[in-house]
Image: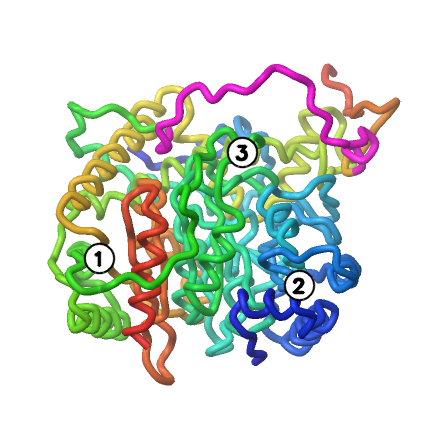
């Protein structure tokens, strides 16, 4: 396990010439080589990373992330390695351009060293749906690291780089952060550009950051956040930026989500979360119970809207424009159907089929439009809750990391594991998972949720909470 | 409703342009039925006074100037991942039998 100084400290030392970027890149690459058994990484971008490090050492960049190595989930378009989204159909895809957030990190001097494993196309919560291999949890190799950004989470927990990027469509950053004991931050929808990221569900997709502290996560977020002309759903950043001091917890109004603390919560998760809430109360926060009655419906809403958007977004993988193409087809239609049969894994097919069903004529109103309307109801409940409290808290997932293979044959059971994260994406609000487990037990995360666009306040209170939980 | 037969699954697969193995058709008929049964709990929710949410940002009509912008891309570079090309164009199999 490699330890890194805080990201801001590393960058300052690079700027002052006290550290060399080439050494940091080698440190990261050798950590990756030494941790191969965990299968967190799909490929390194070693050549490009070394070249960038050299030019940074030569004085080309004195940015806020100068010389800081990082790892990107393999659904970000990045130069220097294939972008596969851990799917067979994209194997061999060589990105002709980079995602906006990667460009923004590079402009401040950060160096991408590797691409991390995920559930193929980010469909899943364990990395078991990767078309290549399953990542192991650094804390217990018989368990999953969570997902879909399980490779990024494990890489951060193993110290393969100071931070990693993930995506969060229904919990894919917060849940693996919770399972591996690192910080995982999902911002307000629209603050992170989706340009150059393999699309999953476009009305829900956000960029997540994994780090070992909230302080590191907020600096990374401050660099990537804001409007992008290449993604017309992006919104303006907070004028004051996102690098904040820890908030004063005293008199902060914090609501515990009643529906998340109900039966069905594993005992280790319950006790860690309850202990954390006690710690927040002892620090002066005003704790109350808050009910969002439609919360139990959020999973049903998500598993209609998300597959619907997936079935539309994944129509582009047709074997004609990029990716795997079947040679064995007599005409165009057969080329589509065979390329997709072989190129997609079972979960991608399952979601495409569900999405196709709920969008098909005759079912559209009953499923898709109904789910969109219940989404409104859920959003209204969040708005009402935030009239009474500043933040909401609860667990991130009903359990800690489960055994590899435990849910593999039951897709519905796998979906139910997302019960405490998807509502946050549906409402577009920001959420963060910070470690709150104790000792040798499996990691558990505390989820803190804020109103839409209150990312600055969320990061500030998370920094304070981090201080009293550990 | 929401019990999908083999024929339903095959029809969906055809709409989605995916060939399925026999094993997949059987598996999906079970799995999709149980997932659809789960999401059907929404049918009883009263939403009479509410409108559907398409997006959460509140943005409307995001405009930009109608000008050509050079991103410096080389068309050849953009076509490098295409399985088959001819004269700088995508080449596909015949469409009509």
Comparing A26 with A411, the one in front is A26
The residue to which callout 2 is attached is A67
Asked if residue B68 lies in the magenta stretch, the reply is yes
Residue at 58% over, 79% down: A2
- The total of numbered circles placed on residues is 3
Q: Nearer the viewer, residue A252 or A83?
A: A252
Q: Give residue A322's quadrant in the image.
A: top right
- Looking at the image, residue A264 sits to the left or right of residue B57; the answer is left
Sort mark 1 into few (<14), some (14-19) or many (20+) by Cα contacts within 10 Å: many
The residue tagged 3 is A313
**Residue A286 visible:** yes
State the CA–CA distance, disc 3 to disc 2: 35 Å
Q: Chain of mark 3?
A: A
User: Along the horizontal axis of the image, is A92 left or right of A445?
Assistant: right
Apparent side of residue A349 relative to residue B89 in the rendered image (left or right)? left
Q: Position of residue A309 (x, y in %)?
A: 46, 34
The percent position of residue A447, horizontal first and vertical second, equals 31, 60
Q: Nearer the viewer, residue A6 or A177?
A: A6
Q: CA distance from mark 1 to mark 2?
A: 41 Å
Q: Which residue is mark 1?
A: A260
Instruction: Rate crowding at label 3 as few (under 14), some (14 to 19) or many (20 or more) other CA atoms within 10 Å.
Output: some
Q: Chain of mark 2?
A: A
Q: Secondary structure at mark 1?
A: helix
Please report the residue visible at 77 percent of the width from the left and 38 percent of the height from the top. Answer: B81
- Residue A304: percent from the left, percent from the top? 36, 37
* Among the two numbered marks 3 and 2 on one chain, the one whose residue lies closer to the N terminus: 2
Q: Which residues are magenta?
A: B55-80
């Amino acid at each position: 396990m490699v330890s890194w100084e805080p990201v801001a400290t590393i960058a300052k030392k690079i700027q002052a010439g006290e550290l060399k970027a080439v050494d940091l890149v080698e440190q990261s690459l050798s950590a990756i080589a030494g941790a191969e058994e965990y299968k967190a990484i799909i490929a390194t971008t070693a050549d490009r990373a070394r070249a960038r490090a050299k030019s940074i050492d030569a004085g080309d960049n004195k940015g806020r992330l100068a010389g800081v190595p990082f790892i990107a989930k393999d659904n970000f378009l990045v130069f220097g390695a294939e972008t596969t989204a851990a799917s067979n159909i994209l194997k061999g895809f060589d990105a002709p351009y980079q995602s906006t957030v990667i460009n923004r990190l590079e402009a401040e001097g950060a160096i991408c060293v590797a691409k991390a494993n995920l559930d193929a196309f980010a469909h899943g919560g364990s990395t078991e749906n990767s078309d290549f291999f399953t990542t192991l949890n650094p804390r217990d190799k018989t368990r999953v690291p969570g997902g879909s950004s399980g490779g990024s989470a494990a890489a951060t927990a193993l110290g393969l780089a100071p931070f990693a990027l993930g995506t969060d469509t229904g919990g894919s950053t917060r849940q693996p952060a919770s399972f591996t004991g690192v910080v995982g931050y999902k911002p307000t929808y629209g603050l992170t550009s989706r340009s150059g990221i393999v699309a999953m569900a476009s009305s829900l997709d956000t960029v997540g950051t994994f780090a070992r502290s909230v302080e590191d996560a907020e600096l990374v977020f401050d660099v990537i956040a804001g409007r992008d002309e290449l993604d017309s759903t992006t919104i303006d950043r907070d004028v004051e930026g996102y690098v904040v001091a820890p908030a004063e917890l005293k008199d902060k109004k914090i609501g515990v989500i009643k529906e998340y603390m109900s039966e069905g919560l594993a005992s280790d998760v319950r006790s860690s979360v309850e202990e954390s809430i006690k710690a927040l109360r002892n620090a002066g926060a005003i704790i109350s119970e808050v009910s969002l009655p439609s919360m139990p419906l959020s999973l049903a809403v998500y598993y209609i809207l998300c597959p619907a958007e997936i079935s539309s977004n994944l129509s582009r993988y047709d074997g004609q424009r990029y990716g795997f193409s079947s040679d064995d087809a007599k005409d165009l239609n057969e080329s589509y159907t065979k390329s997709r049969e072989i190129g997609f894994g079972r979960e991608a097919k399952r979601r495409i089929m569900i999405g196709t069903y709920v969008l098909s004529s005759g079912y559209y109103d009953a499923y898709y439009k109904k789910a969109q309307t219940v989404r409104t109801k859920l959003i209204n409940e969040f708005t009402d809750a935030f009239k009474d409290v500043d933040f909401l808290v609860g667990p991130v997932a009903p359990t800690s990391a489960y055994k590899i293979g435990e849910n593999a044959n039951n897709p519905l059971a796998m979906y139910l594991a997302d019960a405490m994260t998807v509502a946050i994406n549906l409402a577009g609000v920001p959420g963060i998972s910070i470690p709150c487990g104790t000792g040798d037990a499996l990691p558990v995360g505390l989820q803190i949720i804020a109103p839409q666009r209150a990312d600055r306040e969320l990061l500030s209170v998370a920094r304070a909470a981090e201080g009293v939980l550990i | 409703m929401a019990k999908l037969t083999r024929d339903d699954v095959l029809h969906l697969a055809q709409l989605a342009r995916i060939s399925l193995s026999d094993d997949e058709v059987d598996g999906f008929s079970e799995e999709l039925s149980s997932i659809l049964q789960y999401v059907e709990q929404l049918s009883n929710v009263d939403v009479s006074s509410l409108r559907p949410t398409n997006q959460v940002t509140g943005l409307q009509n995001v405009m930009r100037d109608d000008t050509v912008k050079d991103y410096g891309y080389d068309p050849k570079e953009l076509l490098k991942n295409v399985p088959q090309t001819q004269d700088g164009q995508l080449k596909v199999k015949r469409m009509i039998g």
